[in-house]
Amino acid sequence: MANDPLASRSKTVNLGSVEKVQKGQGFCFIVAGEEIAVFRQRDGRLFATQNRCPHRQGPLSEGVIGSGKVICPLHSHKFDLCSGEGPDPKECLQIYPVREEKGEILIGVDARAPEMKKA
């Protein structure tokens, strides 16, 4: 909707080829100084969340994924990739809208944030 104030605060960033994220795995991108984990399930569906676990800051992009969930590699805390819900109401992930378009990963981020840094 053109007059939606939330829409005006979001911008789309192209993270490059979907092949950067192997099926059944995650990959960490640095976008606007933030670590964002992009996950690609074996069925090809994409999800994007903050990369660091809110429990002990484990790298979620290195966790086990499946059935729309990721398990932190440090302490086995499980998070829902659609909602960000974790094992405790105080432990929820920031999620980002993500989609594949023409073989590219497109993610929605805060419009006030700078562009993606190339690693």
Image (cartoon, rainbow, N blue to C red):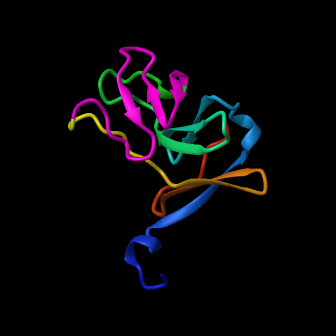
Looking at the picture, tell me which residue is in the foreground, 28 or 112.
Answer: 28
Magenta span: 62-88
- Left or right relative to 83: residue 91: left
Q: Is residue 117 left or right of residue 57?
A: right
Residue at position x 48%, y 81% in the image = 1
Name the image quarter holding the C terminus. Answer: top right
- Main secondary structure type of the part rendered in magenta: loop
Q: Residue 57 placed where, x, y %?
A: 37, 24
| Rendering coords of residue 45 (x, y %) | 62, 44
The residue closer to the viewer here, 51 or 88, is 88
Q: Quadrant of residue 31?
A: top right
Q: Per the image, is 18 magenta? A: no
Residue drawn at x 35%, y 22% is 77
Residue under the point 73% across and 47% down? 16
Most extreme residue toward the bottom is: 3
The relative height of residue 65 versus residue 108 in the rendered view (above or below) is above
Reply above or below: 55 against 95. above
Q: Is residue 75 magenta?
A: yes
Q: Position of residue 61 (x, y in %)?
A: 53, 28
